[in-house]
């Protein structure tokens, strides 16, 4: 999938993760998606997630290293977003059926009323790393 981004920051990366997920795992997950999609870090406007994850060291480390703003949303707000891949188990755990897709969509929508979910949620794990990270990417049009 290749999208003309015109060298502007039009992508919002939504991330959900387990408690204790490292910045390294978040970085590897995003790098994997960027490689697959041929997007670049320079096209990323920022990172979005659920409020309860904002204090996670992995998020803070990743955003600091890449100088990305971090937008957060409450579970209640995220639960109101229509997403293609809701998960009942996530709804039971954090109060919304989507974190990655919903937060990417909401963050992109704050900038433009026209958005596309370019990368539906993808789940990443590494055998040698604790935690799991879910990533989705929305583009403001």
Image: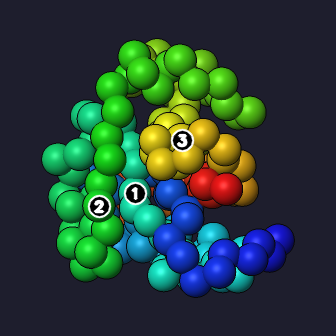
SS assignment at label 3: helix
* Residue at the image position 50 percent from the left and 57 percent from the top: 13
Q: Is residue 90 left or right of residue 139?
A: left
Distance from disc 2 to disc 1, alpha carbons, whole Å, reads: 6 Å
Residue 12, percent across and down?
Answer: 51, 57
Is residue 82 in view from this perspective? yes
Q: Is residue 33 above or below residue 79?
A: below
Q: In this view, does 134 lie above or below 113?
A: below
* Residue at the image position 25 percent from the left and 34 percent from the top: 52
- Report the front residue among 5 and 124: 5
Distance from disc 1 to disc 3, alpha carbons, whole Å, reads: 13 Å
Q: Name the residue under label 1.
A: 47
Q: Mark 3 points at which residue?
A: 109
SS assignment at label 1: strand
Is residue 128 in view from this perspective? no
* Residue at the image position 42 percent from the left and 73 percent from the top: 27
Whether label 2 touches label 1, CB < 8 Å:
yes
Residue 87, percent across and down?
Answer: 62, 26
Residue 48, percent across and down?
Answer: 40, 49
Residue 69 is tagged as 2
- Report the front residue among 118 and 36: 118
């Amino acid at each position: 999938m290749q999208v003309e981004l015109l060298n502007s920051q039009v992508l919002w990366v939504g991330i959900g993760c387990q408690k204790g997920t490292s910045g390294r795992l978040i970085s590897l997950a995003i790098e994997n998606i960027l490689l697959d999609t041929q997007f670049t870090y320079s096209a990323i406007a920022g990172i979005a997630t659920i409020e309860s994850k904002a204090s996670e060291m992995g998020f803070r480390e990743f955003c600091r290293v890449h100088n990305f703003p971090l937008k957060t949303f409450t579970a209640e707000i995220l639960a109101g977003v229509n997403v293609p891949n809701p998960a009942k188990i996530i709804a039971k755990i954090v109060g919304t059926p989507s974190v990655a897709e919903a937060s990417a969509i909401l963050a992109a929508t704050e900038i433009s009323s026209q958005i596309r979910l370019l990368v539906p949620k993808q789940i990443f794990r590494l055998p040698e790393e604790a935690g799991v990270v879910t990533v989705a990417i929305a583009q403001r049009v």
